[in-house]
Amino acid sequence: MKDLTKGNPLKLILTFVLPVFLGNIFQQLYNMADTVIVGHTVNSDAFTGVGLTGSVSFLVLGFINGLTAGFGVRVAQRFGANDAEGVRKSVAMSFLLAAVIAVAVSAVAVPLAGPLLRLMNTPAQYYDYAYSYLVVIFSGIAATAFYNILASVLRAIGDSKTPLVFLIVAAVLNVGLDFLFIVGFGMHYRGAATATILSQFLSGVACLVYMLKRYPELRLKRADWKWSFAEARAQIVIGLPMALQFSITAIGCIVQQTALNGLETDYPGVATAYTAASKIDNLANQTFPALGTAMATYAGQNYGAGRMDRVKRGVAASMLCTVISAVLGFAFCMGLYTPLMGLFLDTEKGGAAALYYEEVMAYGRQYLLFQSAGYLLLGTIFVFRNTLQGIGKSAVTTLAGVTELGGRVLTAFVFVRLWGFTGACMSNPIAWLAADLFLIGTYCAVVVFGENRKRRMRRKALAGA
């Protein structure tokens, strides 16, 4: 367990961020393995079909991830307040809620996979690949929730290294299972999804065994499993807005993907370019969600301990890290673009990559240029949003998601019609800017001005006394 309420904020945050960052990188490599292996063993159309499921997967899995992250914030607050019994009860309720919600979401998501893909105007040559992959992924939502809730609990008590270790194991296992199911058993894109679900489940089992052995304080008692509507409400109050935040962002991504799918006729190969470039983009920007995870836990613990002064110092330290990460991310995308695209595009297997190779490379470079140039905007979202979530203002941050969604809808229905693919490339930076303006304003009103107002009131009360 790690107490984040004492010590240098920058050092604490960097120490916390590094394992989470490495875990995020392995998570991306874990996700990339499916598309890379499919692209090189089937064809680029199969690669594109699997890749086009990203925004729909994000809609559903992001909801689960947001919930479990929110449950972790509740545990972090109890841990920061040195409430051992409260920590155990929060962990037990997290498990119960995650199980119920995962089953319910899976039951809804599986039958909606096809209609969602059709609603997004998924090109016919990619539809079957995308649908088959999605059905398997949605059927295994419980495995995803299982690992995520355990990882969130461990991070909430300051242990960000253990989830990384088991995520690395899962990533290696996923690659091995990909080859076994795709090549050995001939399951192709269905095999890729099956490998992902199985490796996540096994990683969750490993996390659970480790947690019970390493942290006796987290060994739940029978009384801890007693259902408490008050605790369930407290978990949902934090977790649901975070889940909705992910889902609102995902809806914006679906709108963006729908607009891009509609460009395939006029810009042949654009869907393949977007799929490949998005993988590179996701790999390059993982510092930002890692900083966000750190700030949610850091702010949660310090808020629980009544140290709002340390929350503000943590935000300043995280923004310094964000500026440096944005510069490095841009250099990574632009400097290594050609070899990274080569990981995904196998022209010998046929498909759009073989037919429109030069166009695919040009579209991908343009997309990445716009995204990486806006990384400072993206990083700012994670720092301020997760800080607000850590101090219990999750409901407010949902509105930031609404502003982000508005930015993407604007570009999808206006800019794409005016400027085609260039308009689509502008979608994310405009959405990030809209969210930043809201989040920074909210942070200043709640944390900076709010604390100053409280201090003035205390001084007046003392003067009057």
Image (cartoon, helix red, strand yellow):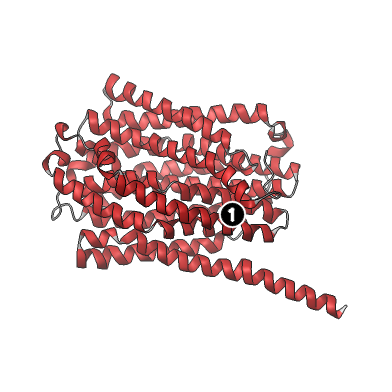
Furthest residue toward right: 465
Is any atom of residue 401 visible in this view? Answer: yes
Does 109 sit above or below residue 256?
above
Residue under numbered circle 1 = 238
Furthest residue toward bottom: 464
- On-image quarter of the C terminus: bottom right
Is any atom of residue 130 visible in this view? Answer: no
- Residue 66: horizontal and vertical position, in percent? 50, 49
Q: Residues within 10 Å of mark 1 (few under 14, many from 20)?
A: many
Does 465 sit above or below residue 93?
below
- Residue 91: horizontal and vertical position, in percent? 65, 41
Furthest residue toward left: 355
> From the viewer's perspective, is 3 left or right of 330?
right
Q: Amino acid at mark 1?
A: Ile
The residue lying toward the viewer, choosing from 257 and 379, is 379
- Residue 262: horizontal and vertical position, in percent? 20, 55
- On-image quarter of the N terminus: top right
Residue displayed at 50% across by 39% down: 145
Residue displayed at 82% across by 76% down: 461
Residue displayed at 47% across by 59% down: 381
Residue displayed at 42% across by 25% down: 173
Q: Secondary structure at mark 1?
A: helix
- Residue 76: horizontal and vertical position, in percent? 65, 47
Count of marks, rendered view: 1
